[in-house]
Amino acid sequence: MSTTQMPKWHPPAPASVEYDVGLRVMNSLTRNKDKFIAMDGGRTVRWYMCGPTVYAPSHMGHARTYLGFDIIRRILENYFGFEVDLIMNITDIDDKIIARATELGIPHKELSSKYEQEFHEDMQALGVAPPSVLTRVTDYIPEIVTFIETLIEKGLAYVSLNEEASNKSVYFHVEEFEKVGTYCKLEPEAIQNAAKLLEGEGILTQTHTSDKRSPRDFALWKGSDDAPNAWSSPWGNGRPGWHIECSVMASEILNRMGVEGNKMDVHSGGIDLKFPHHDNELAQSEAHNGCCQWVNYFIHTGHLHIQGFKMSKSLKNFITIRQALEQNSPRQVRFCFLLHQYNTPMDYGDATMSHALVCDKTFGEFFLNVKGKLREIEASSNLASSHQKWGPHEVELQTVLDATKKNVDAALKDDFDTPRVLKTLLDLVKAVNLYMERDNDQIVSLLLKTCALYVTKIFNVFGLSNTPPPNIGYTIGMSSASDGGANSEEQLVPILNALMNFRSDVRNAGRANPDDMNAILKYCDTFRDDTLVELGIRLEDKASGGSVWKLCDPAELKRERDLKEQETQRKLEEKRALQEQAAQKEAMAKLTPEDFMKALTLEDGKTLKYDPASFDAETGLPTKLSSGEDLNKNQAKKANKEFTAQKKKYEKYLKSTQ
């Protein structure tokens, strides 16, 4: 709980609450976990999310925000049953865009269009669902001008004090607003932070401080002589300030949706936007609409660091989404974010991803093993003849499943606590794995499938899979609706079983006659390691002589195969290095102590350690270093030790030749 005195927050107070799931969310307006109720008391949630400023490739900081909120949106819709209207903007005109376009010598529209397209492609690659409504700043210039005119009429904004400028700026009058409203609701302690205020004004307009009545005032409209990047207005040519765009576009869409007062349930963005951007949004929106609370719940994602440092090109730790997806699959990246609470700081690096990879593999193997076990049971009996009687083991597993459902529900209602959910599901997986160690005729297949179906259901909620019941596990691929809805796994079962049996027979024959069947065994391994991998089929040989097949993502199987080959190559190189060391050691043992001492080198492997001309003819020991310096007492002692050790090796070698 925060110790800062936060401004008064008004909980939603609809005429009646028809839908209350018991959800509590961390609300940046109160810094507490507040009970979540929609404005109308029903299922509809109006949500505005700050979108990207499109002037450069999307990076992992963007992924942290948009993938994190995609997970929350899916939980609201697919678990709690809310109907979310998500509005997201694209900032396609901004000081950063203009500066970058000028640097490249291209129009700002060309630059913003290019990177907006890349952003959408990256979001699709990550599995982030598109918003319900998408807005662009340049499409709403007339609405922005009208919005600003209303603020001027209310005395809460003013035209710049620079009388000489033909294209004037317009500023929000913070002091006047404070007479009717509350400024800095999100970060009251930053209200006098001049550095942040200045940063929020944009890199091209930070010198226009003489235009303002107060340094705290911020730009709503930026007067500009830059014709390609300006629009006409009552105050001359210019472009919108950064903060005004979100207020206007959100209000416009909410108004057209028929929302009273243009208010919203949820506003979201990265934590770095809290002040001044989001605080300025709230001020100008509440000033325009004449309300005391424009947003009911403000939620922010936490900072993302790369191996302990803020992501920065200068530190060479700037990772684009496309670079990240070259190393890991979209599901693995999603696992990484699910393992961290969305609004806490997160460090992205090898250690973080290794945890996600382990988690992904654990659940993946769980699904594959359950499906394999169910196939084994179904191959020997149908439902009518299978073992379905419950005993102590079934009661115990059902108890674990019931506790899992209860704990998952509690975690999701507690500010979308996905790390706790995954931990709870892993406990269920352990219990199921233990249950599957029993003989097939002692396993209740319906209970086993029920457990796997529940994990699949939660994974569908999180966007980790899109597998419709009664199927379980990760989505491998769906066929067309014309085949009655059967999935690819069901279609391939007979073929795969036949191939598996054929290969097992050939393999067993080869093992029985190893001298004659090596070629066949090699073909079997090639079939397993290459042919089936390309088809997305993992074939696992059992010690007893049988085999089990598992449908997987071909890309993941290829990655596993490549890693296995790399490990094999590493071991071969390690073995070769050991052999070379042994050969070198053997060759050195054949040298006389005197020749050995004369051959010793420094760490560079080239410079002789001792002066060849300084060796004592009687003792065979050096007296000088290669630099010409006399050996001191410690150096002489070490040289004697080296000489004695080599003498023993040489004598051992001579003895072996006799």
Image: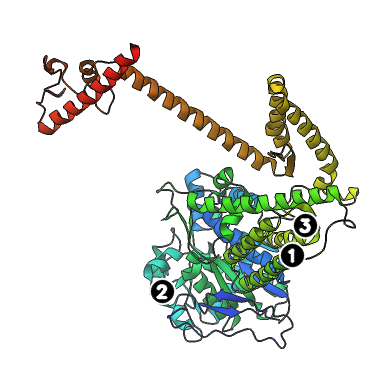
Tell me, yes or no, if residue 346 can be seen here.
Answer: yes
Label annotation for residue 394: 1
Name the foreground residue: 544 vs 321. Answer: 544
Q: Specify whether 81 is left or right of 315.
A: right
Residue at disc 3, secondary structure: helix
Classed neighbour count for the residue bearing mark 1: other residues with Cα under 10 Å, few (<14), some (14–19), many (≥20): some
Which amino acid, by three-letter code, is at mark 2? Ala
Residue positioned 72% across, 27% down in the render: 512
Classed neighbour count for the residue bearing mark 3: other residues with Cα under 10 Å, few (<14), some (14–19), many (≥20): some
Q: Specify whether 460 is left or right of 345.
A: right
Give the answer, above or below, for where 201 lies relative to 475.
below
What residue sits right under mark 2 in the picture?
190
Position of the C terminus by quadrant: top left
Comes first in the chain, label 1 or label 3: 1
Residue at disc 1, secondary structure: helix
Q: Quadrant of residue 147?
A: bottom right
Label annotation for residue 442: 3
Residue positioned 60% across, 56% down in the render: 335
Which amino acid, by three-letter code, is at mark 3? Gln
